[in-house]
Amino acid sequence: MAELKYISGFGNECASEDPRCPGSLPEGQNNPQVCPYNLYAEQLSGSAFTCSRSTNKRSWLYRILPSVSHKPFESIDQGHVTHNWDEVGPDPNQLRWKPFEIPKASQKKVDFVSGLHTLCGAGDIKSNNGLAVHIFLCNSSMENRCFYNSDGDFLIVPQKGKLLIYTEFGKMLLQPNEICVIQRGMRFSVDVFEETRGYILEVYGVHFELPDLGPIGANGLANPRDFLIPVAWYEDRQVPGGYTVINKYQGKLFASKQDVSPFNVVAWHGNYTPYKYNLENFMVINAVAFDHADPSIFTVLTAKSTRPGVAIADFVIFPPRWGVADKTFRPPYYHRNCMSEFMGLIKGNYEAKQDGFLPGGGSLHSIMTPHGPDADCFEKASKAKLAPERIADGTMAFMFESSLSLAVTKWGLKTCRCLDENYYKCWEPLKSHFTPNSRNPTEPK
């Protein structure tokens, strides 16, 4: 496959034409009486028309046939996709999952949509407020099928296997240690090349933004120029027997048929696009004197709530970096949080738990549920010589953090059979080191 091309920048106003049809973008207007090459003009709105310019999102697509040309939608098998947060009772315990099992292609072919499994979530789709965490487990490409989400944005984190994603805006190749965002309403299809696994953060009613930098200044964390947007590419392809368009609407799956490929956009312009980002490009900020800084300094993207400083969801990573803090317990501190914390591991070993937390698995520490380093990590870090050291080389852990109280689905608690029933035992060996007669045990009495 030829190397794909991209446009650089986050949230930019972009324009792209497939080079096979030069001049396919109208000049000076969006909706001419007759478009170049006799294309149809179609607007895709990601915000209300009357939003401020800083938050207004829309793109104009110039396509061979408009997306309205399809048969009626009909309900289909929901698989393991759900928005029912009450199907099992709440569980405040620390939860950890072993790597989610990928179905074998020799036993059953499962594509990206069929392999979606909702793990947890909160909020209400109909009122555009909330989120869901999904796991995708697949072994085959989507053939004459595409998917779009009427409920929210998908932030996709591949863990095993690369994804070739066809969108109405062009193609993106996504490798583990990269992420992409497919925004609400955008049609896409996924090709895979092996048994494939990953994580999805879905947010309802809002879009992901870069976090404000405050006193950090103009540069740092995820820099806008490192986000990549696909360039226009189209196929003018008839599909005998029908092309299936799958829509997630109000948490349910529906399908319709049409006679042509939906990837028939010859040109487009606007600021409402899919995009991808390589996590290796993240500019890490860290404590260089003392103490362990809060993990918010590792935020890549945020989906804000209506409360200032409070997110419906943050996407946070724990990348390779230097640890140099003096007189400090360097691993993550023990914590009880007013936020929910779902963690996943793309590769390597997470610093606070070297055993048990494995690539392709996950953990959930719910609101105000205590968590922190296991006993082995505490003992080693408390006695370690505090020289400058590399942390997390060869590792990439991440966190979906939310102000909402996440409910775990029946699939997550029971059906997947990946829940680690012994997770709590990693803290049982913790023992008291209290020395009531010596304020500083390292000093002679």
Image (cartoon, rainbow, N blue to C red):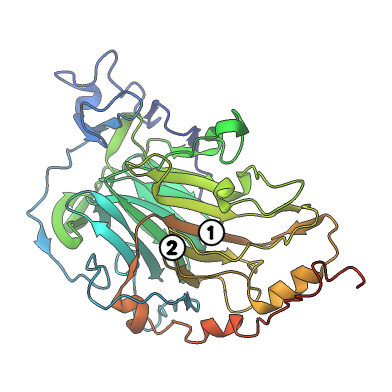
**Element type at mark 1:** strand
Which mark lies nearer to you, 1 or 2?
1
Residue 185 seen in the figure:
yes
| Residue positioned 63% across, 62% down in the render | 332
Distance, label 1 to label 2, CA atoms, is: 10 Å
* 432 displayed left or right of 218: right
| Vertical placement of residue 37 versus 344, above or below | above
Three-letter amino acid code at disc 2? Tyr
User: Quadrant of the rendered structure where residue 101 is?
Assistant: bottom left
Three-letter amino acid code at disc 1? Phe
Q: Residue furthest front?
A: 437
Label at residue 398: 1
| Residue positioned 20% across, 60% down in the render | 251
Image x and y of residue 196, in percent = 46, 68
Residue 192 seen in the figure:
no
Label at residue 219: none
Image x and y of residue 313, in percent = 40, 51
**In the rendered image, which residue does mark 2 sit on?**
199
Are the residues at dot 1 and dot 2 in contact (C-beta closer than 8 Å)? yes
Image x and y of residue 30, in percent = 23, 21
